Image (cartoon, rainbow, N blue to C red):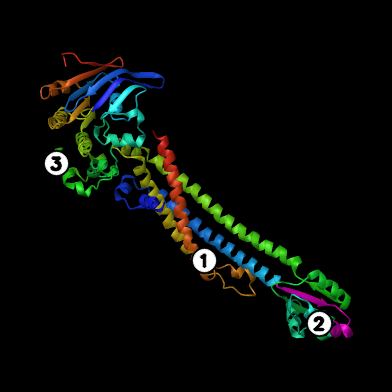
Amino acid sequence: MIELENVAYSYGGGELLSDISVRLQPGSFHFLTGPSGAGKTTLLKLCYGALLPTAGVLRLFETDLRGLDRDQVALMRRRIGVVHQDCRFLDHLPLADNVALPLMVSGREVAQEAANLAELLAWVGLTNRADARPPELSGGERQRAALARALIMSPDVILADEPTGNVDWEMSQRLLQLLVELNRMGKTVLIASHDLQLIRSAKTQVQARVLRISNRRLQLAGADL
Amino acid sequence: MWVAVKGWLASDGQADRVVPPTGFTANLTVFASAAMAFLAVFALALSLAAGRLADRWAEELARSATLRISAPAEQMATQTEAALRVLRQTPGVASARALSQEEQAALLAPWFGAELPLDQLPVPQLIEVIETAQGYDTAGLRLRLSAEVPGAVLDDHTRWRRPLVEAADSLRRLGLLSILLITGAMAAMITLAANAALAANGQVIEVLRLVGGQDRFIARAFVRRFTLRALIGGCVGMALGVLGMALLPQSADQGGFLTGLSFQGAGWLFPLAIPALGAAVAFAATRYAAGRVLKGLS
């Protein structure tokens, strides 16, 4: 699904990631961990084509991104659901429209997907907040809304960048349960998180591989995780 | 081409909603478009009126000439008769007619008043000469007149007709140039406004791209918005301009050029093209600006 082969990424003259090779198989569950500033977000951005590698090969759904233009990458991105750390909502739109945004940009009629949208909002527990504007939402509500938006196009892969970063333990467990549930439905999940407690908790619920970024390189985490 | 433009402008409520409304810049764009359309109406009217004037002067003056006979009173009748005879025999002259005393008095009335005792003054006799379509040989006629009617001077109006027609033609070109300048200024203004709107919505564009939005979708939201604003402003400005033209004094001989500035006949339909032109300019300018900005926001 997503494959990085000897990928490196440099910015401003310095190499942030080096010789990264990883393959996300369909239905797999991965955690990406490492200290702050290690490059977790950068690696996630590479995984959904927001950044292009400065060396190596990046393939999304068997397609090498090097030959694609920006619009073609955008089309590819519709098959990947991304939960951003800062959620990235449009503040002038109500929550329901924000969740439906991927439908809008892909030209699908939101009205025809109303049942889907309602079901998704119910699944993340935000039915009664559908008309609220993003600034009115709590941290947990924003994260759940971001997850709903990532799922509205029924993507094959879910990438989540610190999805529990701004919520309490109870809410982070709830979000984790939603992601585990999605994985059980056959979705490929990759979560970037520095929260080791969360990772340990997840490993009791799902068979997850934990990858760690250290010194710009990716390695499989030890048995402690 | 039209299908492509229609596709871009077709109502897409979803694309419209994703870009936040910007009341202030929206009003400015509508106002600027209205002002440009208003000015364009006057430039168009000026150009059309100057064109009519140039055509009329060229048409009227090209076909006529004046023969002036300055002779002692006792020879005036003889020389007038001789001149008319020569003119009647000249190929290319359709008609020749000596102006009556009343007609000559009317010509002098603006300067000397209506009570001028023309029969007591040594006023030259004027003969109006109308040419055929082929015209006559001016040099040959002058030569013959100098031999047979010594007091006759032929004025074929060339001396003052040409600069007048040239002046009217220049005025027409000036009007058209003004329309071009207004169009260019509007394109520049819309490009700047679109650039500003795109820059102000950089975060919105980023989010749209993150959720899979293609440049075409993002650009369409802006292009449609600016095109509609220019169209609305253009319609308002055009309507006000046309109203202003309608309120101008009607064309009258006494008023000359200034009272003939208004549109005439089918000319009233021409301003309808101004809002469409404004919208087309806004469409092209916004599309260009969007393409440039989106390419820069990688």
The amino acid pointed to by label 1 is: Gly
The amino acid pointed to by label 3 is: Ala
Q: Which is nearer the N-term, disc 2 or disc 1?
A: 2
Mark nearer the viewer, 3 or 2: 2
Residue nearest the observer in this picture, B204 or A110: A110
Dot 2 and dot 1 residues touching (CB under 8 Å): no
- The alpha-carbon separation of the residues under discs 3 and 2 comes to 108 Å
Q: Can residue B203 be seen in this view?
A: yes
Whether marks 3 and 2 lie on the same chain: no
The residue sitting at 12% across, 30% down in the picture is A184
Left of B167 or right of it: where is B118? right
In this figure, which residue is indicated by the disc labeled 1? B244
In this figure, which residue is indicated by the disc labeled 2? B85
B95 shown above or below B23: below
Q: Quadrant of the C terminus of chain B?
A: top left
Which portion, as a residue range, is magenta? B63-84
**The numbered mark 3 sits on a residue in which chain?**
A
Residue nearest the observer in this picture, B102 or B202: B102
Magenta includes A120? no
The residue sitting at 72% across, 64% down in the picture is B162
The residue sitting at 24% across, 48% down in the picture is A109
Q: Residue A122 carries which label?
A: 3
B99 shown above or below A58: below
Neighbourhood count class around disc 3 (C-alpha, 10 Å): few under 14, some 14–19, many 20 upward:
some
Left of B25 or right of it: where is B20? left
Dot 3 and dot 2 residues touching (CB under 8 Å): no
Q: What element carries label 2?
A: helix
Left of B2 or right of it: where is A131? left
- The alpha-carbon separation of the residues under discs 2 and 1 comes to 53 Å
